[in-house]
Image: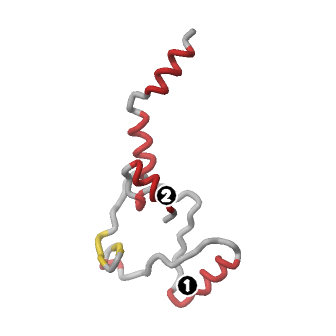
Amino acid sequence: MTEETRLLCEYCRINPLGAFASGSLLVAVSHSASEKVIKKLLKAGIPATRIGRMIPKKNGMNLIKASRECALPVFHQDELSKYLAEESLKPSVEKSRWKTECKA
């Protein structure tokens, strides 16, 4: 996660795991091919890294961070779009001033 993403999510109080990933591509390849794929992507100037591994479906989807395992959260709506929708419902000083200035 970039520092900009971390700061934006912290400011908006949203979970970065549920935020937009526009422009991102998630690729699932076999463990034996992963290093080769990553090297080719990096050579082409495309940032790439291994972020996980496939396990049997019965084990569920888990997140392991700092050697601690927990269930991967499910997001039914993107965190950023949810935040923006909530913010658009709040009265805005800037919106009110613009309407006042434009009435004349």
Identify the amino acid type marked 2. Thr
Q: Position of residue 86 (x, y in %)?
A: 38, 39
Q: Nearer the viewer, residue 58 or 23?
A: 23
Comparing 7 with 36, the one in front is 7
With respect to residue 92, does 44 lie above or below? below
Quadrant of the image containing the C terminus: top right
Tell us which disc is closer to us: 2 or 1.
Answer: 2
Q: Is residue 48 above or below residue 9?
A: below
Which three-letter amino acid code belongs to the residue tagged 1? Ser
Residue assigned mark 1: 34
**Residue nearest the observer in this picture, 7 or 84:** 7
Which quadrant of the figure has residue 76? Answer: bottom left
Outermost residue, right side: 44
Query: For mark 2, does the 10 Å Cα neighbourhood hold few (<14), some (14 to 19), or many (20 or more) residues?
Result: few
Q: Is residue 45 left or right of residue 54?
A: right
Image point (41%, 45%), residue name: 83
Q: Position of residue 14 (x, y in %)?
A: 38, 53
Label 2 – label 1 distance at C-alpha? 26 Å
Q: Left or right of 5: which side holds 43?
A: right
- Write the residue at 51% across / 18% down: 99
Q: Secondary structure at mark 1?
A: helix
Q: Secondary structure at mark 2?
A: helix
N-terminal of the pair, mark 2 or mark 1, is 2
- The residue depicted at 51 percent of the width and 57 percent of the height is 4
Q: Residues within 10 Å of mark 1 (few under 14, many from 20)?
A: some
> Residue 5 bears which disc, if any?
2
